[in-house]
Image (cartoon, rainbow, N blue to C red):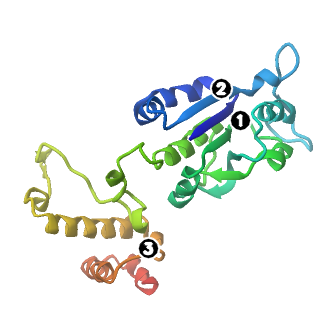
Amino acid sequence: MKITVFTLFPEMVEPFFCSSIMKRAVEKGIITYKIINFREWAEGVHQKADDIPYGGGAGMILMPDPISKALESIGAKGKRVIFATPSGKPLTEKYAEELSKEEELVFICGHYEGLDQRVIDEYVTDEITIGDYVLSSGETASLVIIDAVFRLIDGVIAAESLDDESFTNGLLEYPQYTRPPRYCTKSVPDVLLTGHHGHITQWRCDRRLEKTMLNRPDLLSDAPLSIDERKRLLLILDQDKRTRHRWILSEL
């Protein structure tokens, strides 16, 4: 996959592509990337890229001309162009999987109070939000989307490592433990030390159901639970007397 990032602050983006899993994906040739500072297309001595909003209001808006010219330099029309914005569609694992199938993704990093709508209308195919909150930097939000997407591309992470992660089959991930077996008065659950794969698998399934019930009960209504998983969930609910979660029963 080729990733192109348009930003006024390349120094915020470059380190991400030079570290950890992304660095290895780049070295393997799975990911290629280009970071473009669209200020280079701004005119004047100071290369001004923002201006006050029409209609009044606080803050500054990114001007359409510099970013449009920058996008035209790579032939952005017809490509998957993503703009991270609080007013976009929510990023989900399913959405990330869809994007991971693309051969090329283009990201526009907003800043200040936003981007001139005419640029969005002309070039952007996907407006995406990473949550119901506002960030000061479109770079940060864009990198979150990139991180969620690139790790799903074949060859970046071993397939088995993705099987039981959060949101796989609609559930959150089970708790994880490593050495030492006892730490700060707390011990690793005995079942994980038995080597009995069947019991360990069942324990992990129960913990996924329990954690999803406690932290994200909204996911359970759409989770593709098996008959056995539904029975296990009912058993967990019966053992857990916190009645605020009883409403889940009507969704199963």
Point out the image quarter for the C terminus.
bottom left
141, above or below 24, in the image = below
Residue visible at 79% across and 33% down in the picture: 67
Q: Which label was assigned to residue 223?
A: 3
Callout 3 touching callout 2 (CB < 8 Å): no
Q: CA distance from mark 3 to mark 2?
A: 40 Å
Residue visible at 14% across and 53% down in the picture: 188
Callout 1 touching callout 2 (CB < 8 Å): yes
Q: Which label was assigned to residue 205?
A: none
Say what amino acid the circle numbered 3 marks: Ala
Residue visible at 41% across and 44% down in the picture: 155
Of the two numbered discs 3 and 1 on the same chain, state the one appearing first in sequence. 1
Q: CA distance from mark 3 to mark 1?
A: 37 Å
Q: CA distance from mark 1 to mark 2?
A: 10 Å
SS of the residue at dot 1? loop
Q: Is residue 137 visible?
A: no
SS of the residue at dot 3? loop
Q: Crowding at label 1, few (<14), some or many (≥20) Cα neighbours within 10 Å?
A: many
147, above or below 91, in the image = above
Residue under label 2, please give it.
Answer: 9
Please state the horizontal and vertical placement of residue 194, each as a whole percent of the image: 7, 60
Say what amino acid the circle numbered 2 marks: Phe
Of the two numbered discs 1 and 2 on the same chain, state the one appearing first in sequence. 2
Q: Is residue 125 left or right of residue 186?
A: right
Foreground mark, 3 or 1, reads 3
Residue under label 1, please give it.
Answer: 111
- Quarter assignment of residue 200: bottom left
Please state the horizontal and vertical placement of residue 130, each as a whole percent of the image: 58, 51
Q: Nearer the viewer, residue 179 or 104?
A: 104
Point out the image quarter for the N terminus.
top right
Of the two numbered discs 3 and 2 on the same chain, state the one appearing first in sequence. 2
